[in-house]
Amino acid sequence: MTTLHIQRARVIDPSQSLDTVTDVWVRDGRLQAFSAPPADVTADTVIDADEQWLLPALVDLGGHLPEPGYSQKGSIDSETRAAALGGFSHLCSLPDTKPVADTSAVIKLIQEKALRAGHARVLPLGAMTQGLEGEQLASMVTLQEAGAVAMSNARQPIRDSYVLRRLMEYAATYDIALFLNANDLSLAQGGCMHEGPVATRMGLSGIPETAETIALAQLLLLIEQTGVRAHISQISCRRSLSMLAQAREGGLRVTADTPLANLLYTDAAVTGYNSLYNVQPPLRSEQDRDALRAAVGEGLLAISSNHRPHEIAAKKAPFADADAGMSQYDGFLPMVMSLLEQSDLTASQLIQATSVLPARLVGLPGGLRPGEAFHATLFNPQATTELSSARMASRGHNHPFLNQSLAGAVTATFADGLAIA
């Protein structure tokens, strides 16, 4: 038996309305007790966590791993290590690899490589359609049996409503969760940022909010018709929030998340044509950002990373031609906690959105309770995180805080009681 003793940590667990300074005892990967040790137990490892926060570990509902197929952008080893250093114990990998994660062989390959790496645990999302082409349904049951926790088509469109309905019916029959993106490609086509005054002033093609809301309306109507268990990934605008609220009031089993970037920045960040802020979904208006923050505070939205690492050349093109995406795993928890000063959000609300809600969606405990697997993150709010090229674990250096310091630092991340960062 191996026993871990964490001393004097401030334990914050929104799932139990818990916020207290106490000792924590972990044995054989499971949380055993708070405060007093279990009978006849001697710790093998002792961590002095005075003035540090102990949180349920972060769980990501959508990150792009560049392996297999895009080795120039990183590897499963590099990106899961970056995720662990950012506070994640688990992450859902999107299926847009090469080859696409539409076979059990690719799902198992991703899991095996992640297991060998030994950092953040990977929960693969299987492809809803073969090759993500939006035409032929993938064998979702086979993918689930291979280890996929849900199905997704990433941001690739399914243009045929009949195909979309059939895949929802298929998933509903076997109670397979679908991670869906609301994106009408015909409206978004050619756009590279939010359609609004900033895009007009800069002479860049915009992506209207209706590209999201029209697609979302279609998804919600089909979810209602089929009864499928659905999660809407990467919500970016306030109108979508009101549509989701109405759907929930009508009894639909639907959840949603928003990328961290859309909580931190607005389309004003694009001023200067900085391609680091070319992301999908696009950064939208200040009103949209404020609405998203409010929804997080009300417990209606989870926060995802939408992590997408790129090599330097992919971001050196002019803004409209640069590859969309932002590296997010390194420094993720300090970036989340920066919202404490930028908004009215509390630490408990942010932990709920990054840990508790996402964990429940993928079948993890989502809290710190005696007897359950110990997935936790130690965070020191007094320390700093230096995000230099030399210090980053991710091979994608397209990070908005590159060569800057962030307030706060992850000092340890645990998965099944093991330190993975």
Image (cartoon, rainbow, N blue to C red):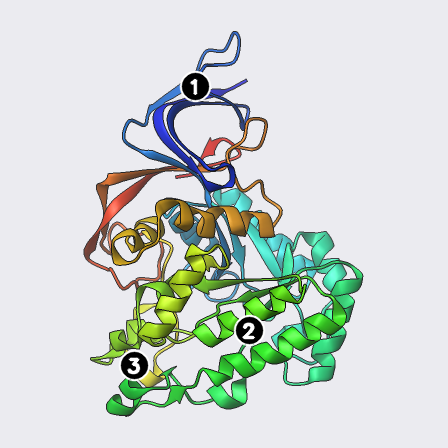
Question: How many C-alpha atoms fall within 10 Å of the one at disc 3: few (<14), some, or many (≥20)?
Answer: few
Which amino acid does the dot numbered 2 rest on?
Met
Where does residue 113 sit, x and y in percent of width and height?
54, 49
Q: Toward which corner of the image does residue 130 lie, by quadrant?
A: bottom right
Identify the secondary structure beneath mark 2.
Answer: helix
Mark 2 and 3 residues: CB-CB less than 8 Å, in contact?
Answer: no
- Chain-order first, disc 2 or disc 3: 2
Q: Quadrant of the N terminus?
A: top right
Which amino acid does the dot numbered 1 rest on?
Ser
What is the distance, in whole Å, between disc 2 and disc 3 at their CAs? 36 Å
Mark 2 and 1 residues: CB-CB less than 8 Å, in contact?
Answer: no
What is the distance, in whole Å, between disc 2 and disc 1 at their CAs? 45 Å
Looking at this view, name the residue that lies furthest to the top. 40
- Chain-order first, disc 1 or disc 3: 1
Q: Which mark is residue 35?
A: 1
Q: Which residue is mark 3?
A: 317
Identify the secondary structure beneath mark 1.
Answer: loop
What is the distance, in whole Å, between disc 1 and disc 3 at their CAs? 55 Å
Of the pair 325 and 380, the residue shown nearer to us: 380
Which amino acid does the dot numbered 3 rest on?
Ala
- Chain-order first, disc 2 or disc 1: 1
Where does residue 288 sit, x and y in percent of width and height?
38, 73
Q: Which residue is mark 2?
A: 243
The residue drawn where x is 31% and y is 33% is: 52
Of the pair 88 and 23, the residue shown nearer to us: 23
Q: Is residue 326 among the parts visible in the rendering? A: no
Identify the secondary structure beneath mark 3.
Answer: loop
The residue drawn where x is 31% and y is 50% is: 337
User: Relative to residue 230, is residue 120 depicted above or below?
Assistant: above
